[in-house]
C-alpha cells in the first residue's frame, strides 16, 4: 500500500434520478494516511487542475523517492516537487525540512536553497541542504 492508514470508507452511486448514469459511482469517501476525503465524480466535463493538489510531507529522501516513483509512473513530472499522477491529479512531494530551508534565519542560504529547488523536478534533500549551507 502506497499510503499507510488508508482505506475506502464508502461508495455512493447515482440512482435512477441521475444526474449521472444509474449505477455509476457518484462519491467515494476515503482516508489517506488517516485523513478523510470525499471525491465527487463530476463527469468528463470537470477535469483535474493544479488548483487542487495533495501535498505529501516526507521525512527522508527514501520517502520522497518512494512517493515520487509510484505517483509519477504513467504520469508527468513537474518542477519543484510537483507531479501529476496517471489520472492527472497533482501532488506535491515535499521534504518536511523544506520550509526551514526556504524560510530559515540565513536569508542568503534560503535564497540558495530556493535557486537549487527551482532547478529540480524531484526534490533532493541533501542537495537542498548543501545549497542552504553554501556548499
Image (cartoon, rainbow, N blue to C red):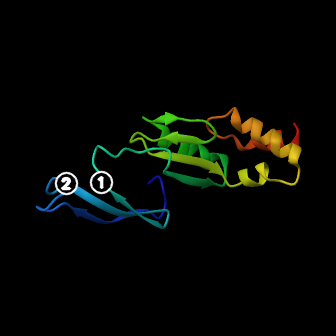
**Residue under the image location 49 percent in, 38 percent down:** 72
Specify the quadrant that holds the N terminus: bottom left
79 vs 51, nearest the viewer: 51
Vertical comparison of 82 with 106: above or below: above
Vertical comparison of 16 with 118: above or below: below
124 vs 119, nearest the viewer: 119
Query: Circle 1 sits on which residue?
Result: 41
Image x and y of residue 89, in percent: 44, 45
For mark 2, give the secondary structure: loop
| Horizontal side of residue 43 vs 78, given as left or right | left
**Residue under the image location 55 percent in, 42 percent down:** 68
Q: CA distance from mark 2 to mark 1?
A: 9 Å
Image x and y of residue 6, in percent: 43, 62
Image x and y of residue 58, in percent: 63, 53
Quadrant assignment, res 59:
bottom right
| Horizontal side of residue 20 vs 64, given as left or right | left
Vertical comparison of 104 with 73: above or below: below
Q: Which circle marks residue 20 in the picture?
A: 2
| Horizontal side of residue 81 vs 37, given as left or right | right
**Residue under the image location 87 percent in, 54 percent down:** 105
Mark 2 Cα shell of 10 Å, populated few (<14), some (14-19), many (≥20): some
**Residue under the image location 42 percent in, 41 percent down:** 88
Specify the quadrant that holds the C terminus: top right
Q: Are marks 2 and 1 in contact (CB under 8 Å)?
A: yes
Mark 1 Cα shell of 10 Å, populated few (<14), some (14-19), many (≥20): some
Residue with the most extreme left position: 16
Amino acid at each position: 500500500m502506497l499510503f499507510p492508514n488508508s482505506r475506502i470508507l464508502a461508495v455512493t452511486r447515482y440512482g435512477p434520478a441521475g444526474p449521472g448514469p444509474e449505477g455509476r459511482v457518484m462519491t467515494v469517501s476515503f482516508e489517506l494516511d488517516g485523513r478523510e476525503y470525499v471525491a465527487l465524480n463530476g463527469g468528463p466535463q470537470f477535469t483535474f487542475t493544479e488548483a487542487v493538489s495533495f501535498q505529501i510531507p516526507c521525512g527522508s529522501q527514501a520517502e520522497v523517492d518512494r512517493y515520487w516513483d509510484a505517483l509519477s509512473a504513467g504520469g508527468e513530472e513537474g518542477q519543484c516537487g510537483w507531479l501529476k499522477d496517471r489520472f492527472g491529479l497533482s501532488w506535491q512531494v515535499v521534504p518536511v525540512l523544506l520550509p526551514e530551508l526556504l524560510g530559515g534565519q540565513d536569508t542568503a542560504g534560503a535564497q540558495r536553497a530556493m535557486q537549487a529547488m527551482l532547478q529540480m523536478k524531484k526534490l533532493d534533500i541533501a542537495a537542498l541542504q548543501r545549497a542552504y549551507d553554501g556548499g
